[in-house]
Amino acid sequence: RDWAAAEALLRAVPPTGRVLLICHINPDGDALGSMLGFGLGLRQLGVQHVRATFPGPPEVPEPFRGLPGLDLLVPAHATDPAPDLVICFDAASESRLGELAGRLSTAGAALVLDHHASNPGFGTVNLVDPSAAATSVVAERLLTRLGVVVDAAIAECLYVALTTDTGSFRFEATTPAVHQLAARLLATGISPGDISRRVFDTRPFGAVRLFGEVLGRARLEPAAAGGRGLVWTFATLDDLARHDQRPYVLEALIDSVRCTAEADVACVVKQGTATEWAVSMRSKGAVDVSRVAVALGGGGHRFAAGFTGRGTVEQVVDSIRAQLDAAVIPGR
Ligand code: 5GP
Ligand code: MN
Ligand code: MN
């Protein structure tokens, strides 16, 4: 990881330079939070033309509509095709950038900030730290090197990113350094209670009823994954329509499914189109779900990974079952 090269790329941008920030499709708190926090930092440094965007549907999920820096966002189709610098956040691969993937080569230079172990290392310079709990950890380090003072607005963005990717400091990646970063962010005066309620604990009544229905059809397969167990469920476009809900409300479902004591692996299969399904997988540690995801064309981390499945729900779940035994971590 060449911090000096990343710093040099950023210092080479003149105040009139155009910087485009991008993150992965269906952005989560880490993608949006690290991108917007970094954008606010660049603005503080005097870079006048900073824009941020993401591929796919341009809608910001409701939990993130209170983030500072949302004014940096523009629709993907309205972005500069050849900015001086493009900076990419939280994308494990170029395919996660959808229609924006081309910007990496049409921009003057491309800087990639990420923390996925499966990241192949794309862009002109990349800072990929698989030991980092979130991309925001990498972003904060770079901002600090550049001399940015992390104010409350930047801190709120980075805090949202850090809490979403660590499951509010519950996951394995929650190191002392993560809590030290959280302490620095909180010292700016941001309100963890307000932020957490907005980001994690608020959803429309229709989503509560939708969750009830989708959780009610969950299946437990104790023999799967060499006896470690699989629990899974699915949600269709029709489910969303009946409850008048947007697809992003389903992102929180996996957190209920993965509570299942009898299964090491949890999956939620979410319909995107007639034949395409976004699959979320979580493991408690006996199975490396990133192996399953990579084998099926996706990526992620050991404990949290995903991919796009094709065909019927049964075909998608069959493809997962077929990979599970090989993904059991030896000795676990
Ligand atoms: P989630 O289940 O929260 O959508 O994603 C969990 C993890 O898997 C994230 O780190 C995310 O980057 C990764 N992931 C999810 N879906 C995909 C996918 O379709 N392709 C790739 N490469 N990674 C994915
Ligand atoms: Mn992400
Ligand atoms: Mn992340």
Image (cartoon, helix red, strand yellow):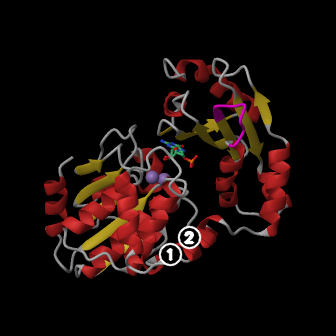
Question: Which residue: 53% across, 40% down?
Answer: 305
> Which amino acid type is marked by label 1?
Leu
The local secondary structure at tag 1 comes to loop
Residue designated by label 2: 64
Please give the label number shown on residue 67: 1
Give above or below for 5 relative to 74.
above
41 over 231 or under it: above or below: below
Point 29% across, 57% down: residue: 106
Residue 240 is drawn in which quadrant?
bottom right
**Residue shown at 54%/32% (left/top)?**
285
As for residue 264 lying within the magenta part, the answer is yes
Q: Does the magenta stretch include residue 220?
A: no
Depth check: give the residue in front, 284 or 45.
Answer: 284
Determine whether label 1 and label 2 are within 8 Å by CB. yes
Q: In this view, does 135 lie to the left or right of 163?
A: left
- Establish if 314 lies above or below 247: above
The region drawn magenta spans: 259-265
Residue 297 appears in the figure: yes
Label 2 crowding class (10 Å Cα cut-off): few <14, some 14-19, many 20+? many
Q: In this view, does 60 lie to the left or right of 267?
A: left
Q: Between marks 1 and 2, how big is the CA–CA gap? A: 6 Å
Residue 200 image offset from top left, x and y in percent: 62, 64
Name the spot of residue 329 as percent of width and height, x first: 50, 22
Numbered disc total: 2
**Vertical placement of residue 164 versus 129, above or below:** below
Q: What residue type is labelled 2?
A: Phe
Q: How crowded is mark 1: few (under 14 residues within 10 Å), some or many (20 or more)?
A: many
Q: Is residue 287 rendered to the left or right of residue 156?
A: right
In the picture provided, is 133 more to the left or to the right than 283? Answer: left
**Numbered mark located on residue 89 in the image:** none
